[in-house]
Amino acid sequence: MAEERTTALIVAAGTGERLGGDVPKQYRAVGGKPVLRWAVEAMARHPLVDQVRVVIGSEQHELARTALEGLDVGDLIEGGAERADSVLRGLAAVGDGRVLVHDAARPFCPPDVIDRLLGALGGHDGAVPVLPVSDTIAKGDRILDAPVDRARLLRVQTPQAFHVEDLLYAYEEAGRRPATDESTVMLAAGLQVAAVAGDPMLEKLTTAADWERAEAIL
Ligand code: CTP
Ligand code: MG
């Protein structure tokens, strides 16, 4: 049987409110290259990834064209107001097969994470990279309430692997409102998502401190 086509779908339509600045974070440079460009290159380089597609904001065509110059990402896809809207618009453009939904704000994806994800997708509805929680976790506001047992807590990263039809079904079934990632939507629809080992290199760039950390690592 022929292998299914695998698309890396990179969502880059956010405005990067938490970091601030003139230009959304995915178009800013880290290690001399735009964050989005790193993310696309990391996916494109993997032998099991057949195509990379990118979802951008409607005001971001110029920024994206510059950041992606010379890379093959097909037509740029326009996203929407919420991350889930951007993912859904991307899925509509991708067609069927396997999809790796990935945040542009996570520039450095090690290839073995993709190997683990696609391996696990063979036996589950989806697969996501996770890391353990190392800090003490507690509930509370200004005063600590109950501590939380961190032993069973996981930090969920992207890329996240699914079959396009399953993810579309899950979005239809579960609605898109509360979703910060696709694993949440899959679980809400009663589907099973495998957890594979994530990687510290996949940390999302959100704040100025994340930027400094990334520059230091590079
Ligand atoms: N994203 C998107 N469409 C949106 C919102 C977010 O494609 N409407 C993308 C971002 O570009 C990013 C990824 O989803 O690559 C993860 O989102 P996040 O890190 O929260 O980025 P922003 O939403 O841009 O940042 P902030 O929440 O600080 O505004
Ligand atoms: Mg956001």
Image (spheres, helix red, strand yellow):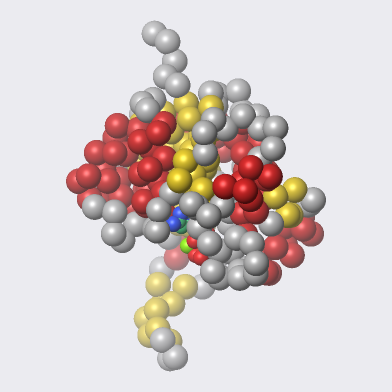
Q: Nearer the viewer, residue 186 or 41?
A: 41
**Residue 198: image location, x then y, percent:** 55, 46
Q: Nearer the viewer, residue 167 or 90?
A: 90
Q: Is residue 124 left or right of residue 175?
A: right
Q: Residue sitting at 41 percent across and 31 percent down? A: 94
**Which residue is outermost to the left?**
173
Give residue 4's quadrant in the image: top left
Residue 145 seen: yes
Placement of the N terminus among the 4 image quadrants? top left
**Which residue is outermost to the top?**
1
Q: Nearer the viewer, residue 44 or 200?
A: 44
Q: Is residue 190 left or right of residue 23?
A: left
**Residue 116: image location, x then y, percent:** 52, 34
Residue 201 seen: no
Q: Is residue 184 left or right of residue 45?
A: left
**Which residue is outermost to the bottom?**
143
Q: Residue sitting at 44 percent across and 15 percent down? A: 3
Give residue 16's quadrant in the image: bottom right
Q: Is residue 26 left or right of residue 117?
A: right
Q: Residue sitting at 40 percent across and 58 percent down? A: 81
Q: How many marks?
A: 0
Location of residue 129 with respect to 50 vertically, above or below: below
Q: Residue sitting at 74 percent across and 54 percent down? A: 30
**Residue 12: image location, x then y, percent:** 53, 50
**Residue 55: image location, x then y, percent:** 49, 44
